Amino acid sequence: MNAQNPVEQFESMMEQLQAQVALLELETLSLSEAIDAYERSVELANGCHRLLDEAELRIQKIDASSRAVQEAGASYRFADIDAARLLLGDDEADLLDLIDDE
């Protein structure tokens, strides 16, 4: 079982990918070794992309949630301000209209 968090996984895979690239840059590899190193590099790069995609999705969910909370808070604040104006008499005409309606 892999106990690494996604950041640690990404960093580990990037280090491994860099090592594979360095290995590929050596001109002493046999064709078979070069193909194996290339295959491992592609696997590592795909794993890094997967982790980045997951992180991006997580950030998008957080942003959407944050926007919803901000919008709800803004409408609540405006409702509070209107109620406070009525209660404190800042808007006298509205207060009189409210009293007349009752």
Image (tube, rainbow, N blue to C red):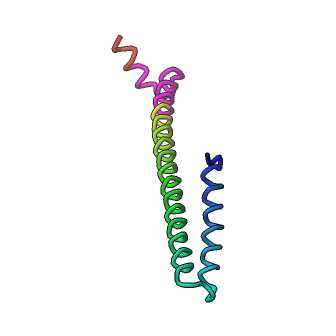
| Image quarter of the C terminus | top left
| Residue 90 percent across, percent down from the top left | 51, 28
Q: Residue at x 49, y 37 (%)?
A: 69
> Is 34 placed left or right of 11 in the picture?
left
| Magenta stretch encompasses residue 27 | no
Q: Residue furthest left?
A: 101
Q: Residue furthest bottom?
A: 27
Which span of residues is magenta-colored?
77-96
| Residue 75 percent across, percent down from the top left | 45, 34
| Residue 82 percent across, percent down from the top left | 46, 28
Q: Residue at x 50, y 55 (%)?
A: 56
Give the vertical position of 58 relative to 30 (above or below): above
Q: Residue at x 57, y 84 (%)?
A: 30
Task: Compare residues 70 and 4 and report the one nearer the observer.
Answer: 4
Task: Compare residues 94 and 21 and report the one nearer the observer.
Answer: 21
> Magenta stretch: dominant SS?
helix
| Residue 20 percent across, percent down from the top left | 61, 74
Task: Compare residues 11 and 81 and report the one nearer the observer.
Answer: 11
Quarter occupied by residue 27 = bottom right
Quarter occupied by residue 8 = bottom right
Q: Please state the total of marks drawn on the protein image.
A: 0
Q: Residue at x 47, y 33 (%)?
A: 78
